[in-house]
Amino acid sequence: MAMLSGGDNDGLLAEINVTPFVDVMLVLLIIFMITAPMLTQGVDVELPQTKAVRNLPQDKDHLVLSVDADGNIFLDEYAVELEQLQGMLTKHVTEQNKQLFLRADKAVPYGLVVEVMGEAKAAGIESLGVVAEQPKDRREDGRAR
């Protein structure tokens, strides 16, 4: 009986085949590219409509303060109590020199919106943008359909 000795490696390769690794990484990349936009969630607010609408800036130097139809207050997507709002705005907006935009549902009582704006003023915020939607019966150029 002949025994095989370990010294003859004529037909064996000691290299790693990276093709399956690359295939798996490309599939994962595609999955993450598709699911990443779905992960960003916001607060459901039915905005009042107005004729003069500009888009929010796309940079990250702003925060959105939202008030939903039930009167719940959110700083971006984090719930905040009215009593805590001034401190949170001072910490996250004033100290970091960010812009603040207010989104309030059209069903929210005007008094609550004024209270929220008062807390923003007390936090030292001088400029507050108010977000609204363009009426659906108008085109992009502002003319009625």
Image (cartoon, helix red, strand yellow):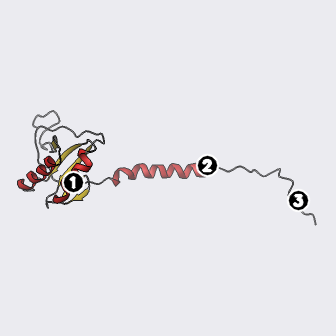
> Which residue is more in the foreground, 143 or 25?
25
> What quarter of the picture does the C terminus occupy?
top left
Q: Which residue is mark 3?
A: 5
Do the residues under discs 3 and 2 have CB atoms within 8 angstroms?
A: no
Q: Secondary structure at mark 1?
A: helix
Q: Which residue is mark 2?
A: 19
48 on left or right of 27: left
Q: Residue furthest bottom?
A: 1
Q: Which residue is mark 1?
A: 87
> What quarter of the picture does the N terminus occupy?
bottom right
Q: Secondary structure at mark 3?
A: loop
101 on left or right of 25: left
> Which residue is more in the foreground, 17 or 62?
62
**Camera-nearest label, 3 or 2:** 3
Q: Secondary structure at mark 2?
A: helix
28 shown above or below 138: below
Q: CA distance from mark 1 to mark 3?
A: 77 Å
How many residues crowd around disc 2 within 10 Å: few (fewer than 14), some, or many (20 or more)? Answer: few
> Residue type at mark 3?
Ser
Q: Where does residue 99 sit, x and y in percent of width and height? A: 23, 42
Q: Where does residue 136 sit, x and y in percent of width and height? A: 14, 44
Whichever of callouts 1 and 3 sits on the residue coming sooner in the sequence is 3
